[in-house]
Amino acid sequence: MSGLPIGAGAATLALLVGAITAQTPCGDVHYGTATAGSGRLAPTIATTGGLPAVGNASFALRADATLGGAVVGEILGLAAVVRPVAGIDLLVDPLVLTTALASGTGPGAGQAVFPLPIPNDPGLVGVRLLAQMVTADPGAPQGLAASDGLQFRPCLDNRLCATSAWQGPAGSDAFSAIAWLGNDRIIAGKRSSQAADRFLLSDDAGRSWRVIGCPGSTGSHTYFFGRNGTTVLSGTGDTGNACLMRSLDRGITWSIALSGAQLRGLTGSANVLAVFGPVHLGAGHWLANLKCTDTRTKLIASTDDGATWTAPSAQPGQGPSSWARQMILTGDGVLLWPSCLTDRMYRSDDKGATWTHAIVPGASLFQPLCDAGGGVYLCGDATASPNTAIGLHRSLDRGRTWQTVTTVNLQRPTATYWRDVIAVDGTLLASACCHEGTSTERYMQLFRSFDSGTTWCSYGNPFQGPYGGMQAIYQMCVTDAGIVFAACQPDATILRWPIETAP
């Protein structure tokens, strides 16, 4: 078996049927249906021997609840199947079969351990391995009983398989936005950036990075990216004197599309605090989302790919003090604009020509928005109250009605937020984060769902860097190869990991 990519999962934890809290740890992923044998007991499969770490020579798989003294087969492979065979569901496309004799006597009393040392090879990180236990059992329908399937992945030192793609000094800075631009190009926006170092750009899928500036840009933080072909837009904030920036060559060079003075002129605001979310609506038509608290104008529009801008008459929000950090256009054509720290989700079915709003019961809305597909959307809360839960909410009807699907209490005395939610290949990832005012608040958690947000589990603080855990994942993106990149705080960290999908 020396040539087989071998992985590990630590404390095995089946995802339970029904509601689970967001604090449930993410363990190995179980799938499929087991087949019972004697005593109507089905064998189980679990990992043992420590954390799922590359180089762990003690890692093993364990079969339990088999018929005592029976022959047990461990099936390993790289692909999941559902194939009826001799009365069981074969759940692994087999590459390796290893057998052992179960200990114990009688129905359900058997156990067999299969050593599976993980080679010390970083190239194995993130490789998906599938396993199933099958045992001879005369009490089974056709003489075979079987466990469900188990999916696990080799990692270095965390269950997420995350590594650092960029690492700055301790407490040095943060990245507040990141986007995949295609053809191996990734761009990250810095949070306390200056005109000369607005962005980091990679042209080799995150292996190396270079600093990109935007001459004459103002405002501190750099937030969010919108793209239309080779045109990329990004805004600055959150400290005022914001500007809108534009690139015509997929992020290599940048210029000012709208200065702070021009934004003030368009909106009638004394100070546009941030330009948060440029959204391309098609055919060179853009909307950009603004934070200003002294005018009702929250959106500006362009119909010539960002060259010129106007303030449309139709605007979301309750009044001058309302604002939104993020805005998205879903795949089925709905614009979403969550009014911050309220329970109102503004929505438009006609690309911003008209707006209505829905109530998100019990919400204090903040940044994250996600289109999970099929009319399923998600949004999240913030709270300034200490040691208070924040809710993640879901709509199943294109944003018309919403329900809370999970909550988490990060147990912090400072503000906490849901920062980002993304959907990729049937997996949802959501980050709940701590207040950015101090680099000591390193208590964020990253959550995962395989069922469109019905149930969630937690990877905990997903990465321990050289200075400690993460404080926030501001935004995530995914490459065409299924690699997630995350813009993090503090320590100017960009993380990368292979997406984990359900079998």
Image (spheres, rainbow, N blue to C red):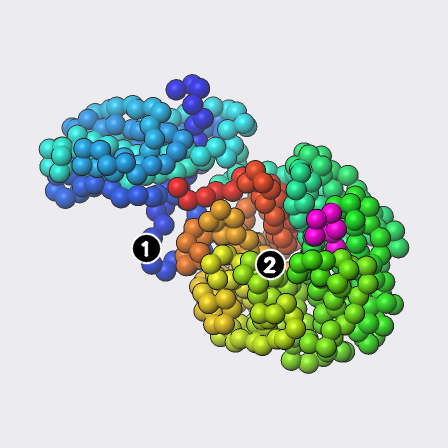
For residue 275, which quarter of the picture?
bottom right
- Which amino acid type corresponds to the residue marked 2 in the rendered image? Arg
Q: Residues within 10 Å of mark 2 (few under 14, many from 20)?
A: many
Place of residue 366 in the rendered image (x, y in percent of width and height, measured from the top left): 61, 66
* Image quadrant where residue 244 sits: bottom right
Which residue does the image show at 36% across and 46% down from the upper left?
Answer: 13
Image quadrant containing the C terminus: top left
Residue that badge 2 annotates = 419
Give residue 195's position: percent from left, percent from top: 85, 52
Which residue type carries mark 1? Val
The image's mark for residue 17 is 1
Q: Along the line of sight, which residue is nearer the eye, 455 or 156?
A: 455
* Quadrant the N terminus occupies: top left
Residue 390 visible in this rendered orientation of the protein: yes
Asked whether residue 233 is drawn in magenta, I would say yes
Furthest residue to the top?
Answer: 2
The residue stretch that appears in magenta = 228-234
**Residue at image x 45%, y 62%?**
406
